[in-house]
Amino acid sequence: GTAKLEAQTHIYLADAPYKYPKKPSATFIAKGALVSPLILDVDGDENKDVMVINIPFGLKNLVNFFMRGKVAVNLDVYRFEDGGYADTPSFHTSLTMDAPEGREQVAYTMGDFNGDKRLDIAFSRTVDSLAIHFGEEKRLIESKPTHIINVPSFGQARSVALRGEKHKDIILFHPGGEKSKQVEVILFD
């Protein structure tokens, strides 16, 4: 059978302090997928954009998971422009990564790693490599990773300014696994 999932994300923009409309200012709908929305500045314009992380539950993704150990993730970005959000995404990107086993989890984090004020994305590409994609002006991220860093990559990643600079660095740790006492720190120049 098929999963009849529908995830709705509603955004309410205040008309005045603590005064919200009865109907949402924007609604984003995803069918047949698990969804996690994030509010962040993707393009460095100091407006809060909406990124919807979408893991489809379709036949193709299930076959990839069970046969190849891979999972596809879609990222849709709705930029905040002209006082609101468009009905269609400003950016769409699909990523494929190794699926973790057991209690492990795909590590991912976002931040400005190269100092250009655009959002960059780091995620577990494979069990032992972290892919870094720098953001671009005309699309969310570069189609191929800017850097591939060979580290145990399943776990949790955090984007932090370790050196007080304008760009972020990455701390990667592995709670609950065999590498639970190991921490990787990735510094960007």
Image (cartoon, rainbow, N blue to C red):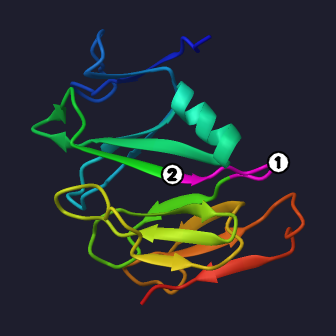
Mark 1 Cα within 10 Å, few/some/many (few <14, many 20+)? few
Q: Which residue is mark 2?
A: 96
Q: Callout 2 environment at 10 Å: few (<14), some (14 to 19), or many (20+)? A: some
Magenta segment main secondary structure: loop
Check contact, mark 2 vs mark 1: CB within 8 A: no
**Occupied quadrant, residue 165:** bottom left
Residue furthest front as drawn: 67
Counting residues from the start of the chain, the first of labels 2 and 1 encountered is 2
The furthest residue to the right: 178
Q: Vertically, is 10 above or below 56?
A: above
Q: Quadrant of residue 117?
A: bottom left
Q: Nearer the viewer, residue 130 or 69?
A: 69
Q: Secondary structure at mark 2?
A: strand
Identify residue type, mark 1: Arg
Q: Which residue is nearer to you in this view: 62 or 137?
A: 62
Magenta range is 97-105
Residue position marked by numbered label 1 in the rendering: 103
User: Residue 174 location in percent, x, y?
Assistant: 78, 65
Expressed as whole percent of the image width and height from the top left, the position of residue 125 reads 57, 62
In which quadrant will I find the C terminus?
bottom left
Q: Residue at x 26, y 75 (%)?
A: 116
Tell me the residue at 55%/81% (across/down).
162
Q: CA distance from mark 2 to mark 1?
A: 20 Å
Specify whether residue 98 is painted magenta. Answer: yes
Amino acid type of disc 2?
A: Thr
In this rendering, the answer to whether 183 lies above or below 120 is: below
- Nearest the camera: 144 or 154? 144
Q: Is residue 134 left or right of residue 31?
A: left
Q: Is residue 57 visible?
A: no
